[in-house]
Amino acid sequence: MKEMPDYDELVIATIKKIFPYGAFCHLEEYNKEGFIHVSEVASRWIKNIHNFIKEGQRVVGRVYRIVPEKNLIDISLKRVSDADQVRTLEGFKRNKRVTKLLEVAKSKIKKQTKFSIEEVKSKLEQAYGDSYLAFEQASAEGADGIKKAELTEEWVTAIIEVAKDNIKKQKRIIAGILTVQSHESNGIEIVKSALNVKNAKITYLGAPNYMISVEGEDYKKCEKKMKAIIDEVTETMEKSGGTCKFERKEK
C-alpha cells in the first residue's frame, strides 16, 4: 500500500478539528493527517465554516498539494463533483467490506495458506478491477467467477462460501435531466429519433425535459454508459440544428 496519496487523487477523510481558517482531517486510506483550507471547503463565500463541515464527518477530498518532507497534504472539497463523491464513498465502503469478507474466508481455511489477505485482494483487483465485483461473480458463478485471479483451491472454496452467504448482486443507478430542443418543423420526430437509445430508461417530464437513468454493476460503468448515451443524443440533435443539455440528479 502507498504511504502517501498522489496529486489530484480523491481521498476519504474524517474531519477531526475545525478552526476559522480551515480544518484538520484524518486520511482514512493512508493513516495520515490532511488539511482543508477554508477557501477549499465550498465554492461560495463562507461566513462560518461550521455551517459546511462538522467534526466526525466523513468527506471526499481532492489532493492539490503535497509536501512530503513536511508530511503536509492539502485537500479540497470544492474541487470534488457530486459524481466523484458518490463513486469514491461507494468504493471505500466496498473495499472495507471486501477486507472483512476475506478475513472471514481466511478463518475457514484450516491449514497454512499461500497468500495473505492483502495478496488475495490485490489479485482480485488486478484480475477484475474491483475486488468486490469478484465476490459478486463468485456468488453468482462459483469458481468460474473468480478463476482469472489464479488463487489456490483453498482460497477459492472459502471465497465462494463466504460470497454465497453474504453477497447479493446489486445494480447501481444514476440519473439526470435531459433538455432536448428542436425548432425545426419536424422537431418532434427529430427529438424522438435522438431519444431512441439503448441501455437507458427515458421518461417524459414535459417538453423539453426528460428523465434519463442507466444502471450497471458499479458507478464507474454507469458513468461511462451515461456519457456515451449523452454524446450520442447530443450529436444527433446538433446534426439537425437542435440542442441537448444534461444535468445530473441524485437518484
Image (cartoon, helix red, strand yellow):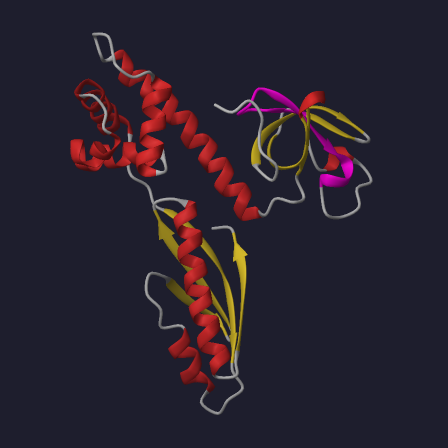
Tell whether 115 sits left or right of 2: left
Residue furthest toward the bottom? Answer: 185
Q: Which residue range is magenta in the image?
A: 25-41
Query: Residue 23, located in which quarter of the rendered image?
Result: top right
Tell whether 158 sits left or right of 170: left
Tell whether 130 sits left or right of 106: right
Tell whether 57 sits left or right of 172: right
Query: Residue 213, located in which quarter of the rendered image?
Result: bottom left
Compare residues 21 and 169 and report the one nearer the observer: 21
Is 51 above or below relative to 199? Answer: above
* 248 is within the stretch colored magenta: no
Residue in the image at 51% along x and 42% along y: 86
Residue in the image at 71% along x and 43% along y: 42
* 30 is within the stretch colored magenta: yes
Is 23 above or below relative to 200? Answer: above
Q: Position of residue 247 (x, y in %)?
A: 55, 61
Q: Position of residue 160 (x, y in %)?
A: 21, 26
Q: Position of residue 177 (x, y in %)?
A: 51, 63
Residue in the image at 48% along x and 71% along y: 234
Compare residues 239 and 208 and report the one nearer the observer: 239
Q: Position of residue 227 (x, y in %)?
A: 45, 59
Residue furthest toward the front? Answer: 69
Residue in the image at 38% along x and 22% along y: 99
Query: Residue 47, located in which quarter of the rendered image?
Result: top right
